[in-house]
Image: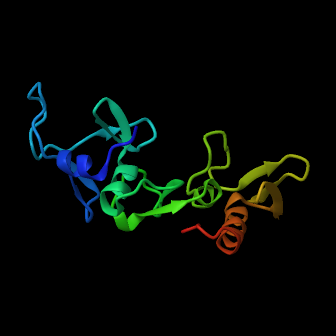
């Protein structure tokens, strides 16, 4: 069951300019007092807040607090910072749109650049981009920096939610 906007506003105050939530009430055990910052960060850097035995991501609570409805899909942090929950930094997104706003390479990437890998056959740095569910090679380059530049140029053209 999801929390209602009324219950959320009773328990918490949301500052849309900072994206922070603070408690309005004192907890039963007295550890939380009115004005205390709510929640903590998870392993991925997202702020989570526990309410009535349920853990909520703060960006989804911000959406409910401001608009009175739960987001239909995902919430994208426009600037890519997972604990920046200012309402101006949040937008609804499909999973694909959310992927388009990736800013860092995955952990298994060894080039250090988004969309860049080493092509062992050609001994060059390859730039590839996903379009829909298909991977497209942009080209092979002498340096990872050149490959990254080509990738970013393509990303700006092809990924609508990209903010790089």
The colour mode here is rainbow
Q: How many marks?
A: 0
Whole-percent x, y for residue 150 in the image: 72, 69
Q: Which residue sits at x=91%, y=48%?
A: 121
Q: Which quarter of the figure is the N terminus placed in?
A: top left
**Pick the front one: 63 or 147:** 63
**Pick the front one: 2 or 89:** 2
Q: Which quarter of the figure is the C terminus placed in?
A: bottom right
- 33 vs 123: above or below: above
Q: Which residue sits at x=24%, y=51%?
A: 6
Q: Residue furthest right?
A: 121
Whole-percent x, y for residue 65 in the image: 30, 56
- Quick check: 96 left or right of 3? right
The quadrant where residue 149 appears: bottom right
The quadrant where residue 31 appears: top left
- Quick check: 93 left or right of 2? right
One can see residue 84 in this view: no
- 113 vs 52: above or below: below
Q: Residue furthest top?
A: 29
Whole-percent x, y for residue 18 in the image: 26, 60
The quadrant where residue 147 appears: bottom right
- Quick check: 143 left or right of 87? right
Whole-percent x, y for residue 52 in the image: 28, 32
Q: Which residue sits at x=62%, y=45%?
A: 106
Q: Which residue sits at x=59%, y=67%?
A: 162
One can see residue 66 in this view: yes
**Pick the front one: 78 or 63:** 63
């Amino acid at each position: 069951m999801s929390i209602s906007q009324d219950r959320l506003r009773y328990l918490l105050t949301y500052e849309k300019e900072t994206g922070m939530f603070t408690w309005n009430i004192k907890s039963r055990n007295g550890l939380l007092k009115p004005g205390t910052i709510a929640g903590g960060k998870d392993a991925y850097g997202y702020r989570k807040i526990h309410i009535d035995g349920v853990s909520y991501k703060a960006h989804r609570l911000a959406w409910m607090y401001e608009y009175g409805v739960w987001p239909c899909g995902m919430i994208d942090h426009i600037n890519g910072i997972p604990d920046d929950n200012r309402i101006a930094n949040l937008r609804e997104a499909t999973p694909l749109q959310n992927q388009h706003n990736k800013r860092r390479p995955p952990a298994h990437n060894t080039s250090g650049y988004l969309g860049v890998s080493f092509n062992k056959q050609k001994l060059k740095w390859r730039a590839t981009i996903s379009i829909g569910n298909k991977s497209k090679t942009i080209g092979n380059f002498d340096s990872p920096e050149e490959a990254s530049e080509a990738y970013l140029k393509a990303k700006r053209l092809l990924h609508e939610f990209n903010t790089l």
